């Protein structure tokens, strides 16, 4: 193509569009649509002076826009549409900005805007800085064939697929290393496959898939985190040592902590949603999409979402700010084996994406792994500290993020709207004990539960009638429920966040840690059932949230069903034992 594109500035002469300009537009469209990597469902980014590469339009629409408004000023190197190549000085690597290689595109997405050529300048040759050198290194791996003549796999694609197999098949490191060794022996001599798991991880680390290791007291008292505690060698609450005792013969033995928590920072994972055009264009779906009134197809249709937007208009004004949900639950690593070990992962989900994306596995982010063997219980607070600090930072300060779809930087903020859990985890997250006669978090101290005469357990029989309308026939029935009881009560009003916080802020601070034994706050079980002040109250907006905790009804139903079947099974075994003993 001709380098001289002066015709871009000669769009209209004497009130008419010039033939030269029309031919140039056709030339541009032919080049752009010839690059399949920038075409999305028959549309490309419009380079007119009004759209400025921000909108995807069809070929005919772009033609009209260019005839009416002309090109973006000085857009004579069509870099956004795949014309310009980037090259690394003093390096053998060269290639197009975007292409058909998905692994190269993945690297470019991770690298961010600093390595995407500017549309109005040519990259001057200079020595790359360390960050750029890292980028070029992993980009070379994406292009470098696994061996000379190999057309199906590059060095990066092979490594990423092996790691994927290891993850999905729960492969040990020893097994992975032996498999790699076997595969390498089958390949030609000039093969470039990473030698073992360590080398593979070292290569993939350049993509930024990192995490933080935080030591914890095995009694769940403290995290060795923050300026005050990170350098301690003993727990400040129970005086338990941080590290295991070294063996007498281990002179160079490393310090081994008793308990390790893995924290996966949330901010880079949220930023990555905007690094790829495939997800960035959907991150404003909740604001731009027209929702049918009266139907709920997405959390943005809920009153809680709209209530939050009304109270925080500055946050709601930027449609790219992210709304989050948090969920956690314990699971046994070893299934139903005799080993009693419970692990608690904490997940965070962004709700900006449309319904067919936001609850899919790639967009459910693991942020925290709390090891066992015991459940953290009410000591969950100490493990949430890094996440709460990061959520506070994302709300108060935000973080500079590049939007690859709109081709601009913006200050991304995030807010946690609610949590999702079963009933047991609800107690751990909220601080309201889900045991005893005041277990109901809705009725609270007004609960109508009673204690069974012989079993001494709390019963919730016939406590649901107060939620029925006054003219409902069940309200007046004396024989179908508790004998001679007529329910005339109306449903209780739900407390607002401000009202709940007014109750909990005066609670005496709980001493976290299993070493302190069972603890009760003043009045617990008599006037209230609060066991602690939840960590979420530290979020500035938490009091204003309409719904702070969501119960996973299907999960709770499954737990009830499992417990019911277990009780029947135990009863059957006991009955058989009694019959064998001849007691009946």
Image (tube, grey):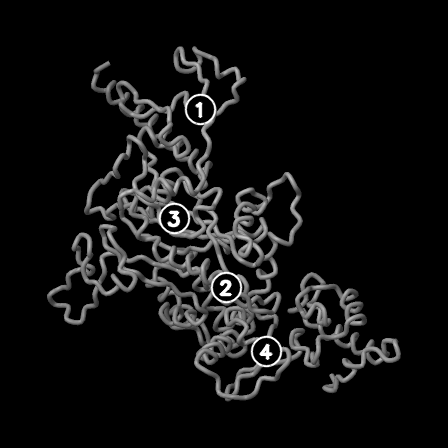
Give the label, 3 or 1, closer to the camera. 3
Q: Position of residue 535 (x, y in %)?
A: 35, 49
Disc 3 designates what residue? 537
Determine crowd level at label 3: few under 14, some 14-19, many 20+ residues with C-alpha closer than 10 A.
Answer: some
Give the label, 1 or 4, closer to the camera. 1
Disc 1 designates what residue? 464
The residue closer to the viewer here, 148 or 269, is 269
In the rendered image, the vertical position of residue 221 relative to residue 475, given as above or below = below
Give the label, 4 or 3, closer to the camera. 3
Determine crowd level at label 1: few under 14, some 14-19, many 20+ residues with C-alpha closer than 10 A.
Answer: few
Instruction: Name which of mark 4 and mark 3 comes first in the sequence.
Output: 4
Label 3 to label 2, Cα distance in Å?
A: 25 Å
Disc 2 designates what residue? 271
Instruction: Name which of mark 1 and mark 4 comes first in the sequence.
Output: 4
Q: Residue at x 79, y 69 (%)?
A: 63
* Whether label 1 touches label 2, CB < 8 Å: no
Numbered circle sitting on residue 117? 4
In the rendered image, the vertical position of residue 528 relative to residue 174, given as above or below = above
Res 64 → quadrant: bottom right
* Whether label 4 touches label 3, CB < 8 Å: no
Give the label, 3 or 2, closer to the camera. 3
The residue closer to the viewer here, 185 or 543, is 543
Label 4 to label 3, Cα distance in Å?
A: 44 Å
Helix, strand or loop at label 2? It is helix
Helix, strand or loop at label 1? It is loop
Location of the N terminus (image quadrant): bottom right
Q: Residue at x 20, y 42 (%)?
A: 517
Instruction: Name which of mark 3 and mark 1 comes first in the sequence.
Output: 1
């Amino acid at each position: 193509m001709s380098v001289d594109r002066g015709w871009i500035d000669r769009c209209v002469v004497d009130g008419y569009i010039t033939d030269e300009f029309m031919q140039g537009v056709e030339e541009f469209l032919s080049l752009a649509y010839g690059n399949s990597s920038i075409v999305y469902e028959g549309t490309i980014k419009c380079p007119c002076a009004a759209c400025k590469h921000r909108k995807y339009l069809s070929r005919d629409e772009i033609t009209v826009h260019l005839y009416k408004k002309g090109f973006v000023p000085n857009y004579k190197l069509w870099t956004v549409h795949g014309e310009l190549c980037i090259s690394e000085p003093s390096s053998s690597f060269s290639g197009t900005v975007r292409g058909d290689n998905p692994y190269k595109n993945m690297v470019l997405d991770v690298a961010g805007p600093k390595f995407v050529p500017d549309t109005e300048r040519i990259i001057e040759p200079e020595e790359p800085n360390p960050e750029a050198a890292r980028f070029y290194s992993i980009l070379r791996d994406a292009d470098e064939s696994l061996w000379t003549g190999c057309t199906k796999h590059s060095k990066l694609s092979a490594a990423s697929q092996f790691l994927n197999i290891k993850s999905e098949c729960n492969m040990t490191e020893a097994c992975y290393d032996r498999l790699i060794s076997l595969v390498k022996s089958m390949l030609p001599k000039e093969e470039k496959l990473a030698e073992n798991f360590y080398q593979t991880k070292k290569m993939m680390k350049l993509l930024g898939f990192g995490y933080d290791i935080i030591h914890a007291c095995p009694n769940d008292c403290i995290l060795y985190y923050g300026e005050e505690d990170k350098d301690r060698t003993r727990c400040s609450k129970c005086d338990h040592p941080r590290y295991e005792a070294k063996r007498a013969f281990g002179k160079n033995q490393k310090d081994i902590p008793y308990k390790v928590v893995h924290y996966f920072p949330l901010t880079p994972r949220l930023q990555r949603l905007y690094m790829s055009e495939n997800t960035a264009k959907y991150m404003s779906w909740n604001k731009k999409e027209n929702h049918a009134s009266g139907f709920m197809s997405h959390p943005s249709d809920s009153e809680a979402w709209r209530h939050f937007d009304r109270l925080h208009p500055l946050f709601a004004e930027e449609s790219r700010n992210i709304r989050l949900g948090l969920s956690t639950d314990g699971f046994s690593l070893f299934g139903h084996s005799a080993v009693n070990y419970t692990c608690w992962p904490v997940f965070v989900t962004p709700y900006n994406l449309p319904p067919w994306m936001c609850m899919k596995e790639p967009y459910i982010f693991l942020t925290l792994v709390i090891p066992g063997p015991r459940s953290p219980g009410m000591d969950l607070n100490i493990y949430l500290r890094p996440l709460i600090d990061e959520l506070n930072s994302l709300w108060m300060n935000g973080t500079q993020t590049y939007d690859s779809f709109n081709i601009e930087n913006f200050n991304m903020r995030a807010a946690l709207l609610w949590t999702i859990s079963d009933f047991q985890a609800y107690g751990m997250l909220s601080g309201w004990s889900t045991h005893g006669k005041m277990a109901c978090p809705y009725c609270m101290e007004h609960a109508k539960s009673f204690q069974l005469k012989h079993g001494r357990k709390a019963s919730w029989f016939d406590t649901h009638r107060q939620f029925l309308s006054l003219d409902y026939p069940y309200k007046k029935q004396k024989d179908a429920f508790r004998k001679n009881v007529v329910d005339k009560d109306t449903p209780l009003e739900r407390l607002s966040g401000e009202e709940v916080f007014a109750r909990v802020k005066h609670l005496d601070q709980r001493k976290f840690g299993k070493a302190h034994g069972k603890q009760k706050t003043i009045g617990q079980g008599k006037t209230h059932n609060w066991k602690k002040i939840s960590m979420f109250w530290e979020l500035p907006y938490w009091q204003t949230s309409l719904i702070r905790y969501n119960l996973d009804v299907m999960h709770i139903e499954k737990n009830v069903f499992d417990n019911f079947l277990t009780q029947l099974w135990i009863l059957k075994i006991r009955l058989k034992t009694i019959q064998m003993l001849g007691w009946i």
